[in-house]
Image (tube, helix red, strand yellow):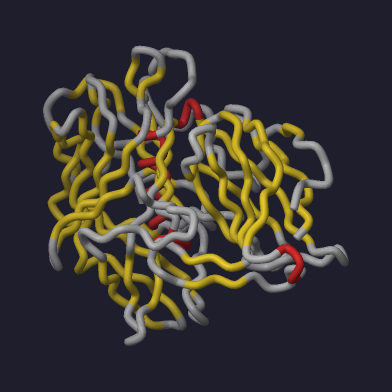
Amino acid sequence: MKRFTSIGAVLVLITYLAGCSGSAGSSLPTTSSVAATGSGSSSPATSTKTTSGWLPAATTNVTKHTNDTLGGGLLGLVFGLLLGDATPVIGNLNVTSINLGIDAVNVVYQGQVTTIATYSTPYVVNVMANGGDPSSIGIGQLYSGNYDHIQFVVDTATSNIVANGTTMPIQFQVGKSTQSSANAGRGTTTSGNSTTVTMTVGGQFMLGSNPAASVMADFNAFESLGQNSSGQIVAQPALFAVATANAAEIQGQVLNANGQPVTNAVVVALNNYGRVANTVNTDVNGNFDLHAINAGTYQLVIYNNYTTASGQNIVASGADASQGASFQGPSVNATVGQITQAGTLND
């Protein structure tokens, strides 16, 4: 299911920068994409990219935002950053926008921070703006060296969600650990204060011996955003980022024994090291779409009772009681640049 919105668009860019593991080195383009503004019942199969998928186009022009100020250590090539996400589950709220005010984007290598772009006024990205599809924030020039983390410096005053016709500020949690049942978001750290926060996400961003020219980032609003007892929107950021050139995607459907869809079951993709590659909840038709993951083999785990990184408890609707709180699904081999079908998962 789609997870990229205006805020998602910003995150998609991050994802493009972060996920490059396991792919062969390739030539860097002069431009990269981004727009400024149980077990499965069928064997996994690989399909080509469709318009409903999350995978970005192989080449898309991107222009540098007019307010960009470029940092040092840069080449003359454009560095593409995509960000996006789908509508999260936050209580009974009908969320229509998730806005992140970006002050700067940095890359980090062994603790050394290099600024790729800064903005004279916060660059507000609605990650839900393009129906959840990744959007480019058109940031600066390509960094010339290694990097193992990406940072988003966020202005809290211009970051908010719009739900039920009301604009609600986001209260970012700083220095706290994820509360996720699957430990999602463990690779994201958030620091700062009430005015500015810095979200840092790690990843493998080298393609052979070359730094990734574009990165797709997922804010994962489902994990990140919640509502406290006072009704305030809180954020425990759980970001996932991959190099565009090594991005893959897994789709499937969760049904119960009667063939009816299971809604809000949480599907978790674990890599070969048992770490969370990404998570997503099923929609009203039981469909799910795991994106912003590196090509590779993943074990799918399905949760009928799940706590998100922000502390929300999510209970699936329509699941068979016999499956319990969680169960192991199929192992799926996700192919780079394609949507891999996981088939039907029986819940």
Picture coordinates of residue 69 (x, y %)? 14, 39
Residue beneath the point at 72% across and 42% down: 342
Picture coordinates of residue 324 (x, y %)? 68, 65
Picture coordinates of residue 2 (x, y %)? 57, 54
The quarter of the displayed image where residue 266 is located:
bottom right
Residue beneath the point at 19% across and 60% down: 155
Residue beneath the point at 36% across and 85% down: 229
The quarter of the displayed image where residue 26 is located:
top left
In this picture, is 176 found above or below 89? above
Could you tell me how many numbered marks the image carries? 0
Query: Is 254 positioned to the left or the right of 73 in the image?
Result: right
Residue beneath the point at 62% across and 28% down: 335
In this picture, is 334 found above or below 74? below
Quarter in which the N terminus is drawn: bottom right
Picture coordinates of residue 138 (x, y %)? 32, 40
Query: Is 231 positioned to the left or the right of 268 in the image?
Result: left
Q: Please indicate, yes or no, whether residue 20 appears anywhere in the rendered image.
A: yes
Q: Residue furthest right?
A: 258
Query: Is 281 positioned to the left or the right of 228 in the image?
Result: right
Q: Please indicate, yes or no, whether residue 34 appears anywhere in the rendered image.
A: no
Query: Is 297 positioned to the left or the right of 77 in the image?
Result: right
In this picture, is 298 found above or below 210? below
Quarter in which the C terminus is drawn: bottom right
> Which is more toward the observer, 292 or 117?
292
